[in-house]
Image (cartoon, grey):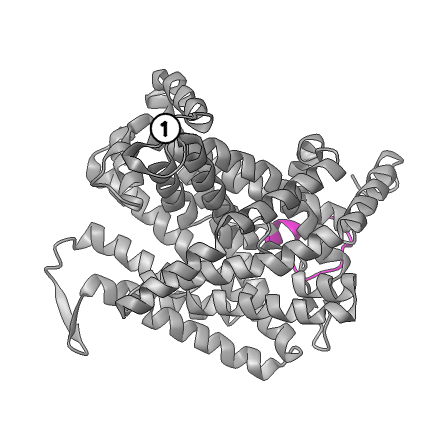
Amino acid sequence: MEKINDVISQIDSYVWGIPLIILIMACGILLTIRLRFLQIRKLGTALKYMVKNEEGGAGEVSSFAALCTALSATVGTGNIVGVATAIAAGGPGALFWMELAAFLGMATKYAEGLLAVKYRVKDENGNILGGPFYYIENGLGKNWKWLGKLFALFGLLAGLMGIGTITQINGITSAANNFFDPDKNNTISIFGIDYTWTTVIAGALITLFTALIVIGGIKRIATVSEIVVPVMIVAYAGCCLIIISCHITEIPSAVSSIIKGAFSFKAAAGGAAGTVMMNAMKSGVARGIFSNEAGLGSAPIAAAAAKTNEPVRQGLVTMTGTFIDTIIVCTMTGLAIIMSGSHNTEELKGVMITMDAFDYGLPFSERVSSFILMVCLAVFAFTTILGWNYYSERCLSYLTGANKKAAGIYRWVYIAAVFIGPYLAVEAVWNMADIFNGLMAIPNVIAIILLSGVISSETKDYIKRLKAGKVEQ
């Protein structure tokens, strides 16, 4: 088993190597130039559209609900654990490169949202379908349908085999265990293996909640996401703001270390290959892309369901997802960690780094601080389960021709994967999920680059009509 894990880990490092990162970043640079820095020029308009629904728009859910569904899958453990991992591996400078990747990623997310609405279709059951598979097939032509099917296959496997199920439920039960029963005093034997009662109870409750929501489809998922996601983002960001405010005198030093680390040509510590700058760049860009999913092709699946008649408008709303996920949430997490110095403690790994930063920065007892972070982790991971159920189900719908029976069976298989998740080892599953996420990005980014002319012309036409007062403000 160890050898299999090593092979999977090696494949993961190849998939998420420099070539894929360059491809995704190059796509962002191309779009930023062709759209004339739209992510700066139209950010205010995008934020207004985010909370102002379009009247008379065709679709299944509001633009805000579609955004919250996408955010439910992106704002999660990546913002808490991923940022900590990036800074621990690449130093404070990794946060700068994470922000740069997000800035370019905003243009990519805009393009994904635009194309999702422009090329979406309605199936025989009246459901709105869209995403990379449809803008590949309908935008590039039938000869490219194989590329769309490839994306759908990778998306289906990513959702079912890890990123949406096993890793998330395992993260929830682990966080609950660390808080309620860290010494594993209360256990039960299942198939000869001891598990804590916390694991069993938490796993059963999350499975029940998942079943109650996902059986209702996109509208129920969107309704829950529309309520839970904004509240949790505000609550988590509020905690980070408290940490920053309580240690505001340390901000100049933290910013200085970020800039120095981002552009330092000194040799990396510990004999690592390359300079401090290269390590910071690789860690920051890779974790940034993983957190906000710009270029992976997941968010446009949710964006396609939005009630809108204007692809550009939904593109702008979709773009705000990356702004919220990385520019706001990840930045606050990163500053809290850097100001606390938790990333410099070798004994701390992953979520423990962020937990130490919360214990250091929040003006509460360690018990209270740990409870707050546990709740944030649990809710973020749960919403990721919901978001990825919708993504992977839409991938299945494309592969099976919107077969209702297949969709019904799949939902129960997905729920079963959540149920067994707490009792499985997750290292190999995380790596497999990483691999499928990376493989999703390849067909998606290729399509976006080939359709960049369409994206540019649609944008120019909309802005022209907007200035002339011919579209809803």
User: What residue do we see at 71% from left, 63% from top?
Assistant: 136
Which x, y percent locates residue 346? Answer: 22, 38
Q: Residues within 10 Å of mark 1 (few under 14, many from 20)?
A: some
In which quadrant of the rendered view does residue 434 lie?
Answer: bottom left
The number of numbered badges drawn on the structure is 1
Q: The disc labelled 1 sits on which kind of residue?
A: Ile
- Horizontal side of 365 relative to 434 (left or right) equals left
Quadrant in which the C terminus appears: top right
422 w.r.t. 277: above or below: below
- Identify the residue shown where x is 76% and y is 61%: 119
As rendered, which of 42 and 430 lies closer to the eye? 430
272, above or below 383, in the image: above
Q: Position of residue 118 (x, y in %)?
A: 77, 57
Residue 154 screen position, x and y as percent: 54, 67
Residue 297 placement (x, y as % from top left): 60, 56
To which residue does mark 1 refer? Answer: 242
Which residues are drawn in magenta?
A: 52-66
Q: Give the dominant element type of the magenta stretch: helix, strand or loop.
A: loop
State left or right for residue 153 relative to residue 252.
right
Who is closer to the viewer here, 25 or 396? 25
Tell me if 286 is positioned left or right of 461 in this view: left
Residue drawn where x is 24% and y is 39% of the image:
368
Q: Secondary structure at mark 1?
A: helix
Q: Is residue 65 magenta?
A: yes
| Quadrant into which the N terminus falls | bottom left
Is 55 magenta? The answer is yes
The answer to whether residue 430 is seen in the rendering is: no
Note whether 314 is above or below 96 in the view shown.
below
